[in-house]
C-alpha cells in the first residue's frame, strides 16, 4: 500500500494543498513556507490510529484545533480542517477523507464533521450517520481509531501506524534528560536504546552495514558497536584509526553532530523496509558534508528497492536534487503567498522546468532560483552600529 495523492484544507500554512506522490518526494521551499507542517500531515494520520492515541490526542499534541487550523481558513471548506488521501494497494484503490470542526456551544472540542472511506468506488463509511445523530459524543472519535468499527478498512489504520519520522537532534541523544520527550520520540532521545533492543542478530548485521558506510563518509572511522554501562544504559562506541595498533574509542558524547546524524539516518533507512510505510526525513542534510548530501538520493533509492516504502523528505539543500535519478515530478515546491503557502510539483507547466532544462540548468539551479529570497541586504541592519 502507498499514498498516491494528498489533499488538505486549512492546515497550518496551507489554505488548500493538493498533489500526487510517487515512491519519493523532495519538499523544498523558503524558510517558514511550511515544509515541516506539510510532513506533519502524514504524522497526524499516524496519530489517528490506536497506537497514536486517536483524534483528541492528535489535535491536543499540536496545541489544539485553533493552533492547527490555518489563519487563512475564513469560510474556506466551511472553516473545517480537512485531510484526504488516495492510496493504492495492488489492484485496490482506497480513499480516506476526514473533516474536523470545533464542537461549539462552549466546549470547542474537535469533532468529526465528515469521515469517508471508499474502496474501488464503493463507499464503506460515511459519517455522521444515524448513530452519530442519536449520540453526538461518538463524533469525538474517528472510526479509524476504533478497532470495533474499522474492521472493513483496518488495512488503512495498519498502514498509517507505519509512518516513521526522522529529525534526530544530537544534543538530545547525548543528554535525553535535557528536554521533555514528545510522543514517539521524534528527536532521538531513546534512539540508542531502540538500536540496542533490536534482535541481536539483526542489529549486528545492520551495524556492520552502517560501519562500511561510515568508513566511507567519516575520516578515520573504523568500527561501530553498542555497549551497556554499569547502570544498564546502552552507548554507541566507535573506533577511530590512530598511530596506536588499536583504534581509539569514543562514545556518542564525543561524536560530532554530523556523525551522530549520519548514524541515525543510516539506521532509519536500513530498518524502514522491514515495515514498509512512509519514512519522513526532515532536513537530513543538516551537519553533513555536501558530498554526502549529494549521495543521499542514491542511498534512499537503494533502501526502497523491492519495497513499498515511500520516502518524503524536506530539504534546504538544492544540491540534493542533482542526482540523475531525481525527476521534476518528485520535487514539491512550496511558495508563500498573501493567501497562505501553496504547493506544486516542479513538473507543472507553471514552473517552466522543461524550458529551463533545455537551457542547460540543473534541477538544483532551477529550484534555487524558485526558493531563494530576493534582496537580503536587510539582514545587515542587525549588525550595524547604532552610532
Image: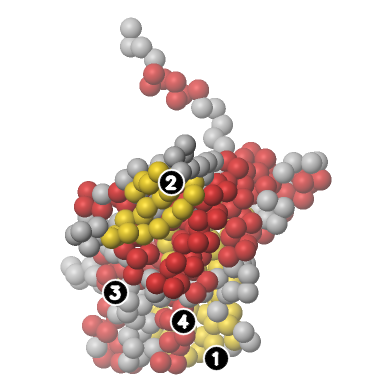
User: In the rendered view, would you say 211 is above or below 144?
Assistant: above
- Image side of residue 289 versus residue 112, left or right: right
Q: Which residue is mark 4?
A: 156
Q: Is mark 1 in CB contact (under 8 Å) with mark 3?
A: no
Residue furthest out toward the front: 245
Choose mark 1 or mark 3, whichever is in front.
3
Choose mark 2 or mark 1, whichever is in front.
2
**Disc 2 secondary structure class:** loop
Mark 1 / mark 3, whichever is N-terminal: 3
**Disc 3 secondary structure class:** loop
**Disc 1 secondary structure class:** strand
Q: Is mark 2 in CB contact (under 8 Å) with mark 4?
A: no
Image quarter of residue 89? bottom right
Instruction: Please tell me how many numbered marks the rendered image carries.
Output: 4
Indicate which disc residue 246 carries: 2
State the separation of the CA atoms marked 1 and 3.
Answer: 28 Å
Amino acid at each position: 500500500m502507498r499514498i498516491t495523492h494528498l489533499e488538505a484544507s486549512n492546515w497550518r500554512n496551507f489554505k488548500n494543498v493538493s498533489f500526487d506522490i510517487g515512491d519519493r518526494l523532495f519538499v523544498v521551499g523558503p524558510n517558514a513556507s511550511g515544509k515541516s507542517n506539510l510532513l506533519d500531515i502524514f504524522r497526524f494520520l499516524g496519530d489517528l490510529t490506536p497506537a497514536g492515541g486517536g483524534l483528541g490526542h492528535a489535535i491536543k499534541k499540536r496545541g489544539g484545533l485553533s493552533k492547527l487550523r490555518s489563519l487563512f481558513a475564513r469560510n474556506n471548506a466551511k472553516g473545517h480542517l480537512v485531510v484526504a488521501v488516495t492510496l493504492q494497494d495492488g489492484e485496490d484503490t482506497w480513499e480516506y477523507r476526514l473533516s474536523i470542526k470545533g464542537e461549539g456551544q462552549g466546549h470547542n472540542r474537535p469533532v468529526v464533521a465528515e469521515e469517508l472511506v471508499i474502496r474501488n468506488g464503493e463507499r464503506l463509511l460515511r459519517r455522521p450517520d444515524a448513530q452519530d445523530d442519536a449520540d453526538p459524543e461518538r463524533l469525538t472519535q474517528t472510526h479509524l481509531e476504533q478497532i470495533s468499527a474499522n474492521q472493513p478498512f483496518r488495512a488503512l489504520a495498519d498502514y498509517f501506524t507505519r509512518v516513521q519520522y526522522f529529525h534526530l537532534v544530537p544534543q538530545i541523544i547525548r543528554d535525553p534528560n535535557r528536554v521533555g520527550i514528545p510522543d514517539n520520540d521524534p528527536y532521538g532521545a531513546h534512539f540508542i536504546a531502540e538500536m540496542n533492543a533490536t534482535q541481536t542478530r539483526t542489529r549486528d548485521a545492520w551495524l556492520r552495514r552502517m560501519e562500511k558506510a561510515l568508513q566511507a563518509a567519516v575520516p578515520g572511522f573504523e568500527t561501530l558497536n553498542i555497549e551497556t554501562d554499569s547502570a544498564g544504559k546502552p552507548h554507541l562506541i566507535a573506533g577511530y584509526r590512530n598511530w596506536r595498533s588499536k583504534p581509539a574509542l569514543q562514545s556518542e558524547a564525543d561524536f560530532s553532530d554530523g556523525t551522530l546524524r549520519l548514524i541515525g539516518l543510516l539506521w532509519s533507512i536500513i530498518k524502514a523496509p522491514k515495515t514498509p510505510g512512509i519514512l519522513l526525513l526532515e532536513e537530513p542534510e543538516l551537519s553533513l558534508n555536501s558530498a554526502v548530501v549529494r549521495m543521499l538520493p542514491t542511498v534512499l533509492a537503494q533502501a526502497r528497492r523491492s519495497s513499498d516504502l515511500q520516502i518524503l523528505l524536506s530539504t534546504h539543500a538544492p544540491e540534493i536534487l542533482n542526482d540523475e535519478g531525481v525527476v521534476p515530478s518528485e520535487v514539491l515546491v512550496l511558495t508563500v503567498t498573501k493567501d497562505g503557502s501553496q504547493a506544486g510539483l516542479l513538473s507543472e507547466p507553471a514552473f517552466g522546468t522543461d524550458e529551463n532544462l533545455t537551457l542547460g540548468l540543473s534541477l538544483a539551479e532551477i529550484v534555487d532560483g524558485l526558493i531563494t529570497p530576493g534582496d537580503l541586504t536587510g539582514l545587515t541592519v542587525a549588525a550595524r552600529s547604532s552610532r
